[in-house]
Amino acid sequence: MIITELISGLGNQLFQYAAGKSLALKKDTILKIDRTWFDLEFEKQTHRTYGLDPFAIQSEIASQAEIDLYLRPQSSNILDRIQNKIKSYQPYYKQRVYLEPHFEFDTNFFKTSEDAYLSGYWQSEKYFKDYASIIRQEFQFKLPLQDKNLHWQQLISSSNAISLHVRRTDMVNNPDVVKTHGSCGLDYYQAAASKIAEGLEQPVFFIFSDDPEWCKANLILDWPVHYIDNNQGDFAYIDMQLMSMCQHHVTANSSFSWWGAWLNPSPSKRVISPINWFADPSKNTSDLIPATWQRI
């Protein structure tokens, strides 16, 4: 059994699930989800919630007893205790609790056993590229769009649509997030919009943001623009659903818009992402962006 720990926002949860699913498929075992992070009082201060219910995922939620087998192993059996002691001297990727060792792709990932608990972010397509078709099936949105979102879907499907994602709220207001991530400035969005629109016939931009009013006041483009401003709170995932329906994509330094672009299966899509994903430009993000995407 593989258990994958889900934490943080929706984009991170999708990476964590995809890596766990890929490993379970590789090892021919089952995947279960640990979502207890969202039940902790301390973590509730982040306003993050479990976000995979809208998707057609096939894995079960791990019970507390199953989680405890990995995180709180207690056994009176002397052989079990000896085996656990022996495992503690094995390489990190052979431990029952597999802690992500660094941000870039871990080449030892698939060397772990078929009995492991995964704790990390796993932000690279390399963790699940071999099983991309299965991941796409499980990351299908279960419910059709309605009302205003159906209107957006119709506009997207009838135009040369480009999604552009602007993440602002926590990236400009939360000091800890600002210190770690920073945010993409207007210069990036103007340059990315010009680059992605080159040679496209009648491009139309669809702007997705947690601060749509700021975008309306500040993000002025030379092409037709629609501002998607009706999916907040528990319905924010619909923005990702609509992003995935666009033909091309400009992402923020955000795993949310990363998935909005990746879930578009078109091999001819254009995707532009920021070259600086973190406030510290020296952090290695070479495995984060798929090879067919462009960074500026």
Image (cartoon, rainbow, N blue to C red):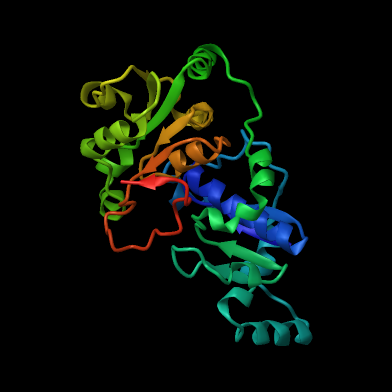
Question: Quadrant of the image for the N terminus?
Answer: bottom right
Name the residue nearer the viewer: 19 or 47. 19
Residue 286 falls in which quadrant of the image?
A: bottom left
Residue 291 picture location, percent across and down: 47, 52
User: Which residue is rendered at x = 72% and y = 84% of the image?
Assistant: 83
| Up/down of 92 relative to 115, above or below | below
Residue 160 picture location, percent across and down: 45, 21
Residue 213 picture location, percent across and down: 28, 23
Name the residue nearer the viewer: 253 or 7. 253
| Up/down of 228 relative to 276, above or below | above
Q: Is residue 236 left or right of residue 67?
A: left
Q: Which residue is the extreme one toward the front?
A: 199
Residue 187 picture location, percent across and down: 21, 38
Residue 211 falls in which quadrant of the image?
A: top left
Can residue 228 be spotted in the picture?
no
User: Which residue is rendered at x = 58% and y = 19% of the image?
Assistant: 145
User: Which residue is rendered at x = 45% and y = 58% of the image?
Assistant: 287
Q: Is residue 32 left or right of residue 276?
A: right
Can residue 134 be spotted in the picture?
yes
Q: Is residue 133 left or right of residue 7?
A: right
